[in-house]
Image (spheres, grey):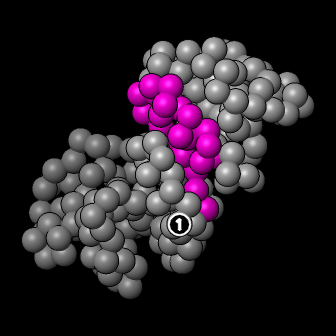
């Protein structure tokens, strides 16, 4: 369990808090809007109404005590930038800030952010890939061009074992698990695939995309 400070109770900040709450983390929410704070109370350990660009207000929060600080402000970039910079000055261990453009990312990284997220861009990318093929059930983008896809077993793989398919050598991809009602990660070369199942596939995104046309 981690202690996490989230600044900004808009949609992104709210959903972030809800997920952190579900994961068992202790969350402190800060926002200048009282109505937003009231709505988020069931999902946080504590919350305060205040201006995150006010050094005196932020100092009394004990920023150094949080394992992670998330700046979720999306409608006022200047406030986001000032808050990020102030968190760094106050000794925050790790700062993740929200951006909507490459220029914002550069400013945030130069002023205290250790990582930057693009909620709209990342969701847009996920939506485009997820629904571009009827074979895709889920998709996670990793780094360096790698991804994990949950795909329907192609017709050409029906009744064939993983050993017969030899996907690692032929296509440079790995099958991590097979789902048929539940996800079975205990698989090997003798595991036989059938249409109607889905498989977790790890590999270069461009290699996995070739499977959509099998």
Q: Image height check: is 64 above or below 85?
A: above
- Residue located 40% across and 60% down the image: 141
Viewer-proximal residue, 36 or 178? Answer: 36
Residue 104 appears left or right of 198: right
Residue 48: x percent and y percent? 75, 20
Out of 26 and 85, give the one closest to the viewer: 85
The answer to whether residue 85 is magenta is: yes
Q: Depth check: 190 or 112 in front?
A: 112
Q: Locate residue 184: give its quadrant.
A: top left
- Is residue 82 highlighted in magenta? yes
Work out whether residue 118 can be spotted. Answer: no
- Position of residue 156 in the picture relative to residue 150 (left or right): left
Start-end of magenta stretch: 80-100
Question: x%, y% of residue 58?
Answer: 64, 24
Q: Position of residue 8 (x, y in %)?
A: 70, 38
Name the residue: 74% across, 45% down. Answer: 11
Give the number of marks. Answer: 1
- Residue at the extreme bottom: 213
> Which structural element holds mark 1?
helix
Q: Which residue is mark 1?
A: 103
Q: Is residue 121 above or below residue 206?
A: above
**The C terminus - image quarter:** bottom left
């Amino acid at each position: 369990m981690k202690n996490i400070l989230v600044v900004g109770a808009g949609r992104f900040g709210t959903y972030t808090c809800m997920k952190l709450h579900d994961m068992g983390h202790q969350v402190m929410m800060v926002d200048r809007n009282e109505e937003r704070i009231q709505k988020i109370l069931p999902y946080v350990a504590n919350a305060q109404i205040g201006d995150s660009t006010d050094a005196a207000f932020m100092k009394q929060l004990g920023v150094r005590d949080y394992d992670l600080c998330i700046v979720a402000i999306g409608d006022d970039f200047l406030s986001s930038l000032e808050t990020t910079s102030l968190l760094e000055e106050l000794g925050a261990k790790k700062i993740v800030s929200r951006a909507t453009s490459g220029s914002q990312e550069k400013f945030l990284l130069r002023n205290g952010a250790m990582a930057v997220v693009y909620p709209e861009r990342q969701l847009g990318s996920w939506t485009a890939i997820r629904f571009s093929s009827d074979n895709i059930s889920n998709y996670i983008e990793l780094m360096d061009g790698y991804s994990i896809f949950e795909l329907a077993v192609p017709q050409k793989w029906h009744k064939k074992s993983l050993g017969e398919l030899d996907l690692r050598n032929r296509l440079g991809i790995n099958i991590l698990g097979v789902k048929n009602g539940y996800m079975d990660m205990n698989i090997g070369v003798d595991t036989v695939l059938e249409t109607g199942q889905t498989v977790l596939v790890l590999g270069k995104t461009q290699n996995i995309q070739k499977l959509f046309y099998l």
